[in-house]
Every structure is written in structure tokens, then in C-alpha cells.
Amino acid sequence: MLLNMLWVSLGAIIGANARYLVSVFVVQYLGKPGFFATLTVNLVGSFILGLVAGFILGKLDNTHHYWFLIAVGGLGSFTTFSTFSLDMLFLVQQQQFLYSILYAAVSIIAGLIFVYLGWMCSRLI
């Protein structure tokens, strides 16, 4: 178990920093509001998680160190539902109801589509 925790920790360091870099890029360089950064990491993370899950679970299993490194630690810290929830709260507090509805719908529907696409792409590898 300790070794798995080390893999999760290493993945979390990588995933958290990747999330930060995506957020900086989306907000500072693309000039988009913060919730676009969250949407971006959630969609990209959903695709990658589908790809990784399809590949690892199809060829290995969820006890392999790659699972703990990439899926649990890396993508667990890269995408966060809590940030999504906080972004939703801020949009509602700012009375941006249309944005909040669109944000929730796109996050959930596109997230499911992206995780499915990732899973299907893993079958091609």
C-alpha cells in the first residue's frame, strides 16, 4: 500500500502542476474566465482518463502502478469536481444563470462523450 501511495503522490504532483499550467494558459494567454480553465481540464482529463482506463484496464488491471500514477494521482489532481462546483456557485451568485446551465450541461455531457472517446481510442492502440 505504501508503494501505491508513493505512485499516487508522484502523479498528484504532476497532475496539480499540469492543472495550474492549463489554468494560467487559458486565463492569462487566452483571456478567458476561470471557469473555462476548469471546463478545459475536465474535458481533457475525461478524455485522457477514458484512454488510460481503456488501455490499462484492458491490458493490465487497476492494481498496476500505472493506474495509481496516472488515473488516481495524476488525473485525480488534474480534474476536480469541487472546482467545478465552486465555479457553478460563483456563476449563480453573479446571476449568470445561462452560463451556469450551459457550463453544467457541457461539462457533464461532453465529459461523458470525451471519456467514451478516450476509451474507444484506447482500443485502437
Image: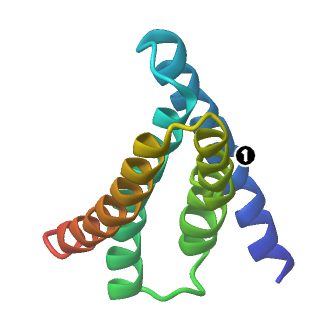
Disc 1 secondary structure class: helix
Q: Image quadrant of residue 109?
A: bottom left
- Neighbourhood count class around disc 1 (C-alpha, 10 Å): few under 14, some 14–19, many 20 upward: some
Q: Judge from the rendering whether residue 34 lies leftward or rightward of residue 9; answer left or right.
A: left
Q: Residue 107 appears at what percent x and percent y?
A: 40, 56
Q: Quadrant of the N terminus?
A: bottom right
On screen, residue 96 above or below 62: above
On screen, residue 89 above or below 51: above
Amino acid under disc 1: Ile
What residue lies at 63% left-to-right and 71% top-to-bottom?
68
What residue lies at 56% left-to-right and 58% top-to-bottom?
75
Identify the residue under disc 1: 13
Q: Residue 6 appears at what percent x and percent y?
A: 79, 64
What residue lies at 60% left-to-right and 45% top-to-bottom?
92
On screen, residue 112 above or below 98: below
What residue lies at 19% left-to-right and 73% top-to-bottom?
120
